[in-house]
Image: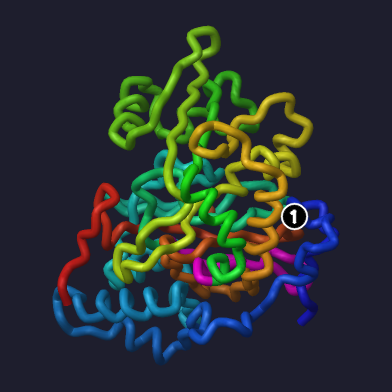
Amino acid sequence: MARVLLRGRSDVVGAMRPSFPQFLARKLADRDTEFPRRMGPRETRALLSDSSATGQRQFSLLRRTLTESGALHLTGIARIDSPERFQSLLFRLGLVTVEYRGGLGHRVAGSKSGSNRVYSASDEPPEFTIEMHNEKADTPDLPDVISFWCEVPAQAGNGGETVLLHSDSVLDRIDPAVLKRLEDKKICYWRRLKHKREAGDYLSWQAVFHTDDKVAVETYLKQRQFSLQWDSNNDSLTYWNVISPTKIHPITGRKVWCNSIQSHHSSYYSVHPSYRGASEHLFTSFYGDQSPIEDSVLQHIREASWSGAIGFQLGRHEMVIVDNHQVQHGRMAFQGPRKLKVAISKPWTFCGKSVIPSD
Ligand SMILES: [Fe+2]
């Protein structure tokens, strides 16, 4: 299989620099633990087989294997052939899916049932490469687990690789002085969302918060310690918050690189087909004191991230389950058909606090 070129690509921000990694790795030599951990039909069956009514044993097994590796790649599950079965498999694993609200990804609900949710993985244009990020890392209550299921795989040679990046791979590569500066100053995530009548291709605040009710939006944001401002001229919403680029993992207690610094930065949107050439940026990231993050720091983060990332094609009806605290995900641009679904879950935190059940 041909290697995936990175350096020189116009759809990957920063890739024109000669110091940029040349190829996307399929496997990393510097990681002892298999990443992602590949589980065939037998192992997947073992994960699912449990006669107890509570499913406690498989939940514990899932938690242990997922925490050890950071991501699981489930293969040989051809019977998982619909979004409903994907959702039901997650439920059997103890991963009750939750609503994707307040996130800045372009995605629509593909299946709804009670409190469970399955969405299109991304409705971003296919020619756009999605930089690695922890899902909703710009919020204080990010999901614990994000799961992807492949409905229609990309054809060989057409791109669309799923990209994963383990926190350890970044922390091993990032300049300690840069890390200290980012941790000392923290990150300010800033957004401006237009009213739906003016949003065009952009996300409106109604689409992000699933409501037309401004009071409901304010309540949601204030509960999560965001600052916000409405523009009375055009009903656009500006909101921002300051959080650390690293966090303590709720299970391992280890420091993890968990953020979306570069994928929230305006430089990322400069190559986005819908935002290219825009006179104003709707999202960006600053240091916590709202001073700009230097281009050299962004470039360093991008090079450290891409050189530590791995990418692979998901096969039909295969799944990837990702520990969202310690692993970032992304997607290479693609051509032709490709369809993935996504679901997010919060089995071990509530409002940012650990609620891990005992085994
Ligand atoms: Fe994402």
Residue at 59% over, 54% down? 178
Looking at the image, residue 196 sits to the left or right of residue 344; the answer is: right
Residue ID at (40%, 64%): 255
Residue drawn 28% across and 62% down?
Answer: 347
- Residue 339 visible in rendering: no
Quadrant hosting residue 308: bottom right
298 vs 202, nearest the viewer: 298
Q: Does the magenta-highlighted stretch encompass residue 154?
A: yes
- The total number of labels drawn is 1
Looking at the picture, does residue 162 appear above or below residue 204?
Answer: below
Above/below status of 179 relative to 202: below
**x%, y% of residue 359?**
17, 77
Q: Is residue 29 visible?
A: yes
Magenta span = 146-168
Q: Secondary structure at mark 1?
A: loop
Image check: 351 left or right of 257? left
Locate residue 191, reporting x and y percent. Answer: 53, 31
* Mark 1 closeness class: few <14, some 14–19, many ≥20 residues within 10 Å: many
- The foreground one among 11 and 227 is 227
| In magenta segment, residue 39 | no
In which quadrant of the rendered image does the N terminus lie?
A: bottom right
Closer to the camera in the image, 183 or 166: 183
Label 1 C-beta lies within 8 Å of the nearest ligand 1 atom: no
What residue is pinned by disc 1? 12
The percent coordinates of residue 57 (x first, y second) are: 21, 81
Among the 4 quarters of the image, the one containing residue 12: bottom right
Q: Residue furthest front?
A: 177
Judge left or right: residue 58 versus residue 236: left
Q: Amino acid at mark 1?
A: Val
Residue 285 locus on image (x, y percent): 57, 39
Residue plotted at (50% across, 52% down): 259
The outermost residue toward the bottom is 42
